[in-house]
Image: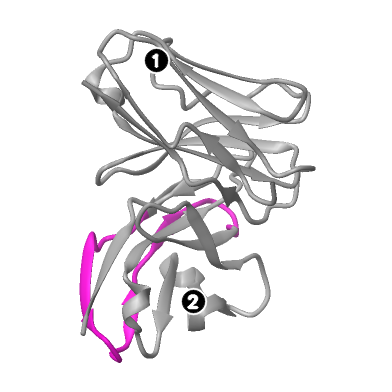
Amino acid sequence: GAGVSQSPSNKVTEKGKDVELRCDPISGHTALYWYRQSLGQGLEFLIYFQGNSAPDKSGLPSDRFSAERTGGSVSTLTIQRTQQEDSAVYLCASSLAGSSGELFFGEGSRLTVL
Amino acid sequence: AQSVTQPDIHITVSEGASLELRCNYSYGATPYLFWYVQSPGQGLQLLLKYFSGDTLVQGIKGFEAEFKRSQSSFNLRKPSVHWSDAAEYFCAVGPTSGTYKYIFGTGTRLKVLA
């Protein structure tokens, strides 16, 4: 597709379950970001991937959160043992490496933990 | 540490009125600055960006922003607001020194009265 694609768009889960959120970046974009958007909190940086370099995981809030990027393209954000405070919109963005330019965002995955 | 402050959580203006959204940043060097807009249920779209040069930058949808180094500000303006401008607006700085992390403000939600 032409843009950043995220799935699922909505996910409702029970507390304690694991969830996986997927991001398919724009073809050719080697930089990929995950952000979390909570009500009134703005965008919270979670993790950044750049090519084959080690990811910047400095924003992951706990060890229940992990992410991987396979083949330098698709990324999966995994949240284990979900808690109610994990409820948020998870946004993925991609960009051209080193461009210092625009981030292209997907429409997000809304996660609700009951 | 780098930070971005958007002091106004909500702003309401009448259609046709002028608009100014405030953004202040904390960054040691000359930053790269961005304004994004998020319509309901959508991802973020870039309005404009500042890297260097002319401190008044023009963006899409009739928006402009002015970089003022002395005030560490990058305020967004529009001379005449349209009802379709109702959305949430995010100011961002990045990528930050030594990383490719973009830091976002908490956003300003704009309501437009008919």
| Residue pointed to by mark 1 | A62
Task: Write the residue at 76% across / 42% down.
Answer: A27
Q: Residues within 10 Å of mark 2 (few under 14, many from 20)?
A: many
Which chain contains the residue that carries disc 2? B
The stretch drawn in magenta includes residue B32: no
User: Which residue in the structure is indicated by mark 2?
Assistant: B65
* Res A47 quadrant in image: top right
**Is disc 1 surrounded by few (<14), some (14 to 19) or many (20+) residues within 10 Å?**
few
x, y percent for residue B59: 56, 76
Q: Secondary structure at mark 2?
A: strand
Q: Nearer the viewer, residue A99 or A32?
A: A32
| Magenta region includes residue B13 | yes
Q: Please give the range of residues in magenta.
A: B5-31
- The amino acid at mark 1 is Ser
Quarter of the figure with the N terminus of chain B: top left
Q: Which mark is residue A35?
A: none
**Which residue: 60% across, 67% down?**
B50
Q: Say what secondary structure mark 1 lies in.
A: loop
Q: Left or right: B55 with respect to B21?
A: right
